[in-house]
Image (tube, rainbow, N blue to C red):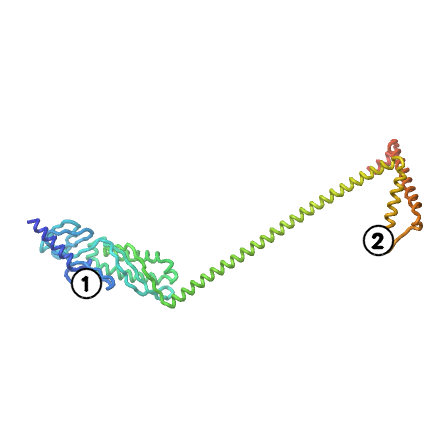
């Protein structure tokens, strides 16, 4: 007998769930109704009959009333009810529900009218509150999402609506959850699908984007010109520094070379004078000196009129022998005075020593 009743109840339940459409939450009745826009038709079967033995599907909660008063909630699996006294009043789905929020108009903080639609994800946590807290919880949450979206968009400008999309979604979810706690529904997330702006506003936004890109390009070009000018100036600076260092090194090297040349000339002249003095002390040295002086006189006399038109000539410029004789006499006089000074310095004369030491004091 029990087996027959179970089979009969299961067949009736299957027939009632498979043949007639129903809402997620319905009052008693068999006529289906639409709770959202025609673009999204979500139907549910009619309420199951009390057949003493009932099999509740997974992720569903059946609210049972006994004599018109809430009795209990049937859990998935095998359940027993008293005929005529117990009645299944509501059927709630515990799955995550997706609701398409229809497109609506909203005004932003800068007085721009926007057309926005979204998707709402929610779940029934408490079947008792969802059944007795509000007449149609899903419809109520949908309307609450629309009004909350309008109020949140009124706090933002048009530019911030696009930049702070995630923040806007989280604010809408928080506002919905604060109001839906008494309904036994939890809003999981809200996503904005499309944001439609007026055509004129879209054109102005495109012009703004183009102007921003041109500004960015101009700024980058100016920065490139500045960097180029800086690099050129740095190059000129380094070139001048290197050129000055090169000139300094050149002057130092030139001065060092001139100093070495002067020293070399002085050493060569001193060596030549020593050799000349040695040559003059030899036999016939005076005759050689006379010959050298005569040659120099002739050479200097031949170049008198080459550098200037003004010429100073001695009275006896044509008498070469007298000029040579005069030069040799001057040389002989100097030669006689130098040996006397050398002998007096070497003899140890105290007067000469005193005279020589006087300048030192």
- Where disc 2 sits, the SS reads loop
Q: Residues within 10 Å of mark 1 (few under 14, many from 20)?
A: some
Of pointers 1 and 2, the one earlier in the residue sequence: 1
Q: Return the residue found at the far bottom.
A: 200
Can residue 361 be seen here? no
At 87% across and 55% down in the image, what residue appears? Answer: 310
Disc assigned to residue 306: 2
- Identified at 16% across, 49% down, the residue is 77
Q: Residue at x 42, y 62 (%)?
A: 209
Label 2 neighbour load within 10 Å: few <14, some 14-19, many 20+: few
Please state which of the two labelled residues, at mark 1 or mark 2, is closer to the viewer. Answer: 2
**Discs 1, 2 touching: Cβ within 8 Å:** no
Counting from the top left corner in percent of width and height, residue 67 is at 11, 56
* Residue 6 in picture, x, y percent from top left: 10, 50
Would you identify the image quadrant in which residue 105 lies? bottom left
Residue 328 image point, x, y percent: 91, 42
Residue linked to disc 1: 33
Give whichever of 354, 344 is nearer the camera.
Answer: 344
Question: Would residue 190 be found to the left or right of residue 319 on screen?
Answer: left
Using the image as rendered, state which of residue 94 and residue 17 is in the foreground: 17
State which quadrant residue 146 falls in.
bottom left
x, y percent for residue 92: 19, 55
């Amino acid at each position: 007998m029990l087996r027959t009743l179970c089979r009969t109840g299961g067949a009736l339940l299957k027939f009632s769930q498979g043949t007639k459409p129903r809402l997620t939450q319905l009052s008693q009745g068999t006529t289906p109704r639409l709770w959202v826009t025609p673009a999204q038709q979500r139907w549910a079967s009619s309420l199951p009959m009390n057949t003493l033995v009932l099999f509740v599907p997974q992720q569903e909660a059946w609210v049972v009333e006994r004599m018109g008063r809430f009795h209990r909630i049937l859990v998935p699996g095998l359940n027993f009810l008293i005929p005529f006294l117990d009645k299944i009043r509501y059927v709630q789905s515990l799955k995550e529900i997706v609701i398409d929020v229809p497109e609506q108009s909203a005004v932003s903080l800068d007085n721009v009218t926007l057309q926005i639609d979204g998707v709402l994800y929610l779940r029934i946590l408490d079947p008792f509150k969802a059944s007795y807290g509000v007449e149609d919880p899903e419809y109520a949450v949908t309307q609450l999402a629309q009004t909350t979206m309008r109020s949140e968009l009124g706090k933002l400008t048009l530019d911030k609506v696009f930049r702070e999309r995630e923040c806007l979604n989280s604010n809408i979810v928080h506002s919905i959850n604060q109001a839906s706690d008494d309904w036994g529904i939890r809003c999981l997330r809200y996503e904005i699908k499309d944001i439609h702006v007026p055509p004129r506003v879209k054109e102005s936004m495109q012009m703004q984007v183009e102007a921003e890109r041109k500004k960015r390009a101009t700024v980058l070009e100016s920065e490139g010109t500045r960097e180029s000018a800086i690099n050129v100036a740095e190059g000129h600076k380094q070139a001048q520094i290197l050129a000055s260092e090169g000139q300094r090194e050149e002057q130092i090297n030139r001065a060092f070379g001139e100093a070495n040349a002067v020293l070399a000339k002085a050493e060569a002249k001193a060596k030549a004078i020593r050799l000349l003095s040695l040559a003059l002390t030899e036999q016939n040295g005076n005759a050689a000196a006379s010959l050298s002086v005569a040659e120099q006189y002739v050479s200097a006399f031949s170049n008198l009129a080459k550098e200037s038109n003004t010429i100073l000539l001695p009275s006896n410029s044509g008498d070469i022998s007298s000029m040579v004789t005069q030069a040799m006499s001057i040389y002989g006089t100097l030669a006689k005075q130098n040996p006397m000074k050398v002998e007096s310095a070497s003899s140890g004369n105290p007067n000469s020593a005193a005279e020589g030491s006087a300048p030192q004091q």
